Amino acid sequence: RKRETVNMPPKSTCNELTLKHKVELIKNSEGKSHCVLAELYGCGRTQVGNILKRKAEYLSAYEENEDSDRKRHCSGSSYNDVDLLIWEWFQRARSLNMPVSGTMNQEKALEFAKQLNEPDFNASNGWLGRFKGRHNIAFSAVSGEKGYVDGDV
C-alpha cells in the first residue's frame, strides 16, 4: 500500500503548522487516524487532536482571508476599544502635522483606558510595539510646513 505524502517540512520535535496547513489537515482528516495525520503533516498526535477540536475556528479564520502563513492565530486584544480610539486620535494628530511620539501614544492610550473603565490596561513598550506593528507606524520626524497644533486633538 502506497502512503500519501504532503509537501511539509521535515518532522521536528515541535512543528507548528501554518493556518493553511491546519485547514489542509482538517480537510484531509476524513477516515484517517490521528497517527496517520501526524505522520503526514510532520507533527504530533496531540497537535492533530487539538487542531481537529478547534476546526470550526480555523476554518472560519481561513475563510475570513487571514494570513494563512501565520502560524499562531490570536483572537486579538481584549482592549480593542482602546486600540480603536488611540488609532483615531493618532490619525487626527498626524493629519494636523502634529508630531506624535511613542510616549504621547502611551499616555493618550492610558487616558482612553481610564475613560473606558479598563483599569488593567497597561500601555507598556510591548503594547506600543504591537500597536505600531498592527498599524504599520514608524515614529519619525515630521517634515513639511507647520500645521495647526491643538492640545485637545
Image (spheres, rainbow, N blue to C red):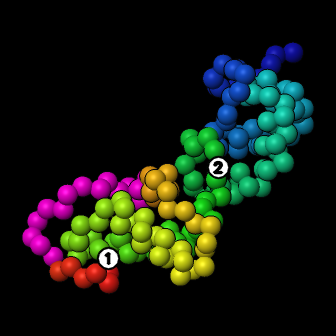
Give residue 120's quadrant in the image: bottom right
- 126 to 111, vertically: above or below: above
Give the percent coordinates (x, y) of residue 23.
70, 44
Magenta segment, prevailing SS (helix, strand or loop):
loop
Local SS, label 1: helix
Taking 13 as reference, is 97 left or right?
A: left
What amino acid type should be assigned to the residue bearing mark 1? Arg
Taking 14 as reference, is 94 left or right?
A: left
Dot 1: within a 10 Å radius of its alpha carbon, few (fewer than 14), some, or many (20 or more) residues? Answer: few
Distance from disc 1 to disc 2, alpha carbons, whole Å, reads 31 Å
Local SS, label 2: loop
- 25 to 41, vertically: above or below: below
Camera-near label (1 vs 2) is 1
Question: Is the N terminus in the top left, top right, bottom left or bottom right quadrant?
Answer: top right
Whether the magenta-drawn stretch holds residue 136 is answered as: yes
Q: Which residue is mark 2?
A: 73
Q: Which mark is residue 92?
A: 1
Taking 28 as reference, is 91 left or right?
A: left
Whether the magenta-drawn stretch holds residue 58 is answered as: no
**Mark sitting earlier along the chain (1/2):** 2
What amino acid type should be assigned to the residue bearing mark 2? His
Between 136 and 27, the residue placed more toward the observer is: 136
Give the percent coordinates (x, y) of residue 153.
32, 81
For the magenta stretch, what is the residue range?
132-147
